[in-house]
Image (cartoon, rainbow, N blue to C red):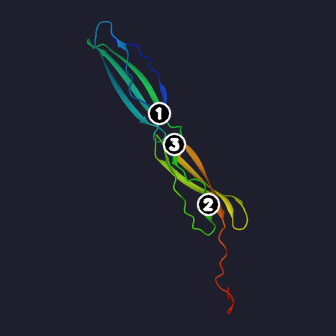
Amino acid sequence: TPPVLFTSLTNSLLQCGEDTAPLDLDVSDACSDTTFVTVDDIEEEGACEGERSIFRTYTLTDDAGNMAQYEVILTIVDTVAPTFVYAPPATTWECNQEVVLDSAWAMDACSDVVIDAALDTLSSLGANQWELEVVWTATDACGNASEHRQPVNVIDSEVPLIVGGPAGTTF
């Protein structure tokens, strides 16, 4: 008689990064003390980087060559957005200052991350002053995205400088 499997095997839906190692099986054979377990995996890529399916076959064989096979499918998905490791804090810019954006960094357990920045004017404070917002978006290969919003105040705090005037005028 073939070996008997006492471990429950079920098809599983796993998040990318979760453990996909083969299980330690509880097996028994009526006539043999030794049962050999082999594991064969066939992997199929999913819709995006980090997603895949594993078609796993456990083959149990006893000393007499009796065999039993059990199959399970592990479906690995990526439904979690990247996480910002660093996102620029709120800042203030002088109105005539050259704008240089700081960098944001994000990571994802399943794939590379693309980071985009978009500048949006929220409101005018008058007199060459504004409230802006930089929207940082981190997107992974499966389209999962997270955002960080960085407030930016643009101010005009410098006193005007007179650089010239009519001849003979002193300042």
Q: 10 Å neighbourhood of mark 1: few (<14), some, or many (≥20)?
A: many
Report how far apart the C-alphas of labels 2 and 3 lie in the structure: 35 Å
Q: Are marks 2 and 3 in contact (CB under 8 Å)?
A: no
Above or below, comparing residue 28 to residue 38 in the picture: above
Sequence-wise first label, 2 or 3 = 2
How many C-alpha atoms fall within 10 Å of the one at disc 3: few (<14), some, or many (≥20)?
A: many
Number of marks drawn: 3
The residue to which callout 1 is attached is 76
Neighbour tally class for label 2: few under 14, some 14-19, many 20 plus, Cα within 10 Å: few
Q: Quadrant of residue 17?
A: top left
Work out which residue is located at the far top of the displayed protein and give it: 31
Rendered location of residue 64, percent (x, y):
26, 11
Query: 99 or 116, which lies in front?
Result: 99
Q: Secondary structure at mark 3?
A: loop
Residue picked out by circle 3: 142
Q: CA distance from mark 3 to mark 1?
A: 12 Å
From the top left corner, tell me how far across and down residue 65 is, in percent.
27, 14
Circle nearer the viewer, 2 or 1: 2
Q: Secondary structure at mark 1?
A: strand
Q: Are marks 2 and 1 in contact (CB under 8 Å)?
A: no
Label 2, secondary structure: give it: strand
The amino acid type, in three-letter code, at marker 3 is Cys
Q: Which residue is mark 2?
A: 92
Q: Amino acid at mark 2?
A: Thr
Give the mark, 3 or 1, whose residue is nearer the N terminus: 1
Occupied quadrant, residue 170: bottom right
Q: Three-letter amino acid code at disc 1? A: Ile
Q: Is residue 21 left or right of residue 79?
A: left
